[in-house]
Image (cartoon, rainbow, N blue to C red):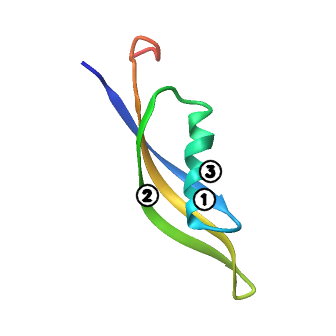
Amino acid sequence: MSNYRVIRLVGSSPTSWEEAAKNAIEEAAAHLEDMRVAEVELLDMRMKDNKVAEYRARVHASFRYDPAKHGG
């Protein structure tokens, strides 16, 4: 039996939503093992001086969770 944990991430980029989502996943992957699926939940932008300053992507990501390894 496998257990999976789902987490919410927020990534950002000065150039695109795609890059923002990719940044969120790649940063999480550097700290988590066996990531499986990612789903973009929300896209938004931060504005500055009436211009887009930053693209942001809120992403749900799942990874295999082993309670024995994580003290549970």
Indicate which disc, 3 or 2, sits on the residue closer to the N terminus. Answer: 3
Quadrant assignment for the N terminus: top left
Q: Which residue is mark 1?
A: 20
From the image, tell me which residue sits under label 2.
40
Residue 31 picture quarter: top right
Which disc, if any, is residue 23?
3
Which is more toward the observer, 70 or 56?
A: 56
Which residue is at the far left?
Answer: 1
Residue 30 to residue 37: above or below: above
Provide residue 43's location: percent of width, then percent of height: 49, 68
Q: Is residue 40 above or below residue 6?
A: below
Residue type indicated by callout 1: Ala
Query: Answer yes or no: do the residues labelled 3 and 2 have beta carbons within 8 Å?
Result: no
**Which amino acid lies under the numbered mark 3 shown in the image of this protein?**
Asn
At x 38%, y 33%, the residue is 5
- What secondary structure is marked by label 2? strand
Question: Are dots 3 and 1 in contact, CB under 8 Å?
Answer: yes
Using a 10 Å C-alpha cutoff, classify the residue at mark 2 as few (fewer than 14 neighbours), some (14 to 19) or many (20 or more).
some
* In the image, residue 12 above or below residue 53: above
Q: Is residue 37 left or right of residue 29?
A: left
Q: Is residue 31 left or right of residue 42?
A: right
How many marks are shown on the rendered structure?
A: 3
Residue at position x 60%, y 59% in the image: 20
Amino acid type of the residue tagged 2 in the rendering? Val
